Amino acid sequence: MAFSLTAKNVELRGSWLVAAVQQPDGSWSLARLDLNDHIGNNDGAFDVAMDRWYNTAEGWSCHLRGPVLCARLRTVAGEYAPERCINLDLFVKNHDGSLEFQDLTDSLLLYAGCLTLQDATRLRGVVVNRDGKFVPSEIDLDQHYGNINGKFEAGERHYSRSGRNVRLEQDATSVKLFAELADCEGEWHEAEVDISECIVNDKGKLAFLKHDEEFVREDWTPAIVEHTPVMGEAVAGLHTGEDKEDHFYYQIASNTNSVDATVGIAIGSFIGRAIRSAAIGMAIGARLAASSDAFVDAKITSTIEDPEVRSQIQEAALGRHILETLRDLFAEDAAAASAELLEAALDPEIDTWTKGLVDWFEKQELPATVLSDISLHTMLSKVLKHLQGETVEEWTAALAHLATLQKSTTTLKLTPPPPPPSPPAPEPEPEPEVIVEEIPTAESEAKDVPVPAIQIEGPETQETQQGSPDSQAVPDSDAAARAAQAAQAQQDPKIPGALPTTAGSSSGTASTRQSSDAGASVSKTGSGSKDKGDKASVRGNGGNGAACTKGWHGIFGITTFRRSWARSKQPKVVTTS
């Protein structure tokens, strides 16, 4: 049924098979199927004639490998058997965008293949067992068919005693036995019988079953067409070998939009036709179409100059996937016998069919070198020998060479230097501080404006004679007169405004400062009077701001009124002669 040909994103969720499947109109829809209702556990092995396998499975072991279901099931003894697997492509079908399970039937056309006739009487082939595996089986047709007056008769025996030139021919809808049979008069007549009407698959064994009524046989051709949306007709046509092969290739390529997928499906169809088993061919085609490494990359093959080595590598890479698919399909203990039956049924014409596909690709100007370098018949023969226990040494060497080429042709990936660290985010600028300036008042101006120091004349000192080193004397035209008045005032204490002085008291210190020295002041304090509380002080440039801003000042007995907030003047140095 090969549901995986038209499915993607296939998952196993518990016992549910979930996938996006293609609908007849080409669109995709989500579908699911509970496998627990259709597959069971028969003493540690899958059984498609039972159900509830998941109830006795080891939970962690349940998984999908492509379309292959794998799990460890509990045996009757209570232990878990080794891992078992079953290829769901044999039973699950895509029916108009929904997943359905195809029960195992007794049809010889549906679940049997590789049928051959040995010794003119023994029918041999592989049939699907209840565990979902192909197993070899055979039946003696001479015990179930006879010759009645030159014709085959089912239910009779010993047709071989009066027959000759016996052969078996099979197509999509029948399996016919041909022979020349003698009548009662000894004349030979060409006779045939469709043995698929009475030879059936009885749960993994070939058996004879004569039906009293008309027997409806299921075959793969309508099953493929019905259960493979969009390209079902093309796949079925390649299996049967119809003449419209170019049309079939185009239809498959248009749907898959991939050269590798188209080649994989076509190879599976050719193998199914060559071994007379559409079921096996569909499973191989689905595997090759979904594999990313089934075909060697052209970049690698272009580096191989020796055509023989290139052919061996292509053959080994493709044969490896076919070998793994057949191992999943065949019972482990019957793989060698099944491979022998496949080898006996293999049609060498498969290389002719392959050449037709290569020619079509060349017409379309598409690459298909994987097929032009190899022989499918030779490759399949090696695969079957491998299943029979023989080692294909050239494949081992070819796969090792392929691994070396893949490693050497891998593009060197230099690790880029780490990007420079991103600059830290700028800190937000602090909001400007709003400074509210106080409007100056009269009092504040008086406090801040420097007041020129008033010099008090005293005894002449060396400093006053030479002048302060920090200031420059300012000439005054009335200096002599003022000096005389100051001397007289010192001698006569009655003169108003004179400062009391005593012997031994310091007359004072005259000092000058630059006007830029805003906080400096020069003060002169008299001491030694009888009244210790009397003090004489002079406000200078750095005077106390708490003092009164207005005051009366007496100089030489002349009372004057001075505003302290007046504009500062350049201090003058008074010298006495």
Image (cartoon, rainbow, N blue to C red):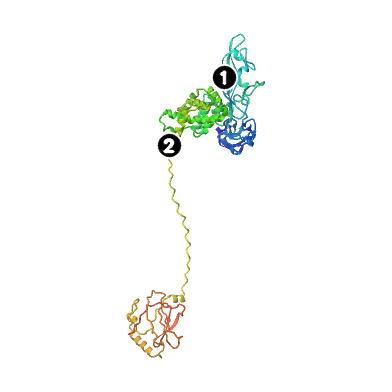
Identity of the amino acid at label 2? Ser
- Label 2 crowding class (10 Å Cα cut-off): few <14, some 14-19, many 20+? few
* Pointer 1 local density, CA inside 10 Å: few below 14, some 14–19, many at least 20: many
Instruction: State which quadrant residue 140 falls in.
Output: top right
The one of 27 and 529 positioned closer to us in this rendering: 529
Q: Quadrant of the N terminus?
A: top right
Farthest residue toward the top? 185
Query: Which label sits on residue 408?
Result: 2
Q: Nearer the viewer, residue 17 or 227?
A: 17
**Image-quadrant location for residue 488:** bottom left
Three-letter amino acid code of the residue under disc 1: Leu
Quadrant location, the C terminus: bottom left
Q: In the image, is residue 10 above or below residue 435?
A: above
Picture coordinates of residue 9, whole percent (x, y)? 55, 37
Q: Would residue 111 be found to the left or right of residue 541 on screen?
A: right
Q: Quadrant of residue 217?
A: top right
User: Considering the numbered disc 2 on the image, is that residue within a helix, a strand or a loop?
Assistant: helix
Q: Position of residue 320 (x, y in %)?
A: 50, 30
For label 1, the residue is 117
Residue with the most extreme right position: 212
Find residue 493 and report its horizontal and vertical position in percent.
40, 90
Q: Nearer the viewer, residue 552 or 389?
A: 389
